[in-house]
Image (cartoon, grey):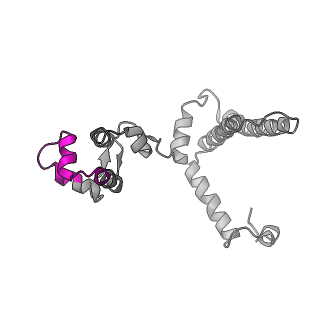
Amino acid sequence: MRGKTRAFYYGDKVRSLRTERGLTQQELAQRMGLGKGACTEISRWENNRMTMDITSLKKVADALGLSVYDTFPEAFKRPPMTMDDYQQAAQRTMNKSLTFEETSRHALHGMASEVGEIHGLYQKFYQGHEMDAEHVKKEVGDLLWMIAEFCTVHGWKMGDVAHMNIEKLQARYPRGFCAEQSLNRKAGDV
């Protein structure tokens, strides 16, 4: 999303906020410092025929005496990251001096190591330590990085691997998990 302006449909919310305050579209436009013809723009927003960028959301919130962050919090959340986006971002920190075999082994050993670290956190929990969910989450992130490295070195896109896995599971369990289908898999179903 770098370099792109994010746009949102907030028409229902803008209309609701405006009418709660007893304002017409013209009055809201005036408070926003918009010129003539702004009612058309506000009407398009309110009917979800036109998106609003962060600047427009801020102007609406300011005109209504509200905090833009509290009024439109979704506009400030990070956009979702696809698996392929993650894989591409993770490549930046791969050790480029390793050979194919070394990178593949590094990723495999790293996956086992990260799973071990997650196990270690749970093992300590059973010894009376507090469970730190954020720590577990970070270790799962490290595991994901190792999976990304393994996929990258083999020339696989993580999104393709994910799709392949879901298709396999849908074929194996067409109606959801079933122990019988798990125990009696078709030939070649790995």
Instruction: Please state the horizontal and vertical placement of residue 110, each as a whole percent of the image.
Output: 72, 35
Quarter of the figure with residue 171: bottom right
Residue 175 shown left or right of residue 91 in the figure: right
Position above or below: 114 against 184: above
Q: Quadrant of the C terminus?
A: bottom right
Q: Quadrant of the N terminus?
A: top left
Q: Is residue 132 magenta?
A: no
- Indicate the position of residue 40 as horizontal and vertical percent values: 17, 54
Magenta part of the chain: 18-42
Q: Position of residue 34 (x, y in %)?
A: 17, 42
Residue at (54, 31) in percent of width and height = 92
* Identity of the residue drawn at 67% across and 73% down: 175
Residue sitting at x 24%, y 56%:
44
Left or right position of 43 against 131: left
Q: Is residue 66 left or right of residue 22?
A: right
Q: Residue at x 57, y 54 (%)?
A: 160
Q: Is residue 39 magenta?
A: yes
The one of 110 and 127 positioned closer to us in this rendering:
127
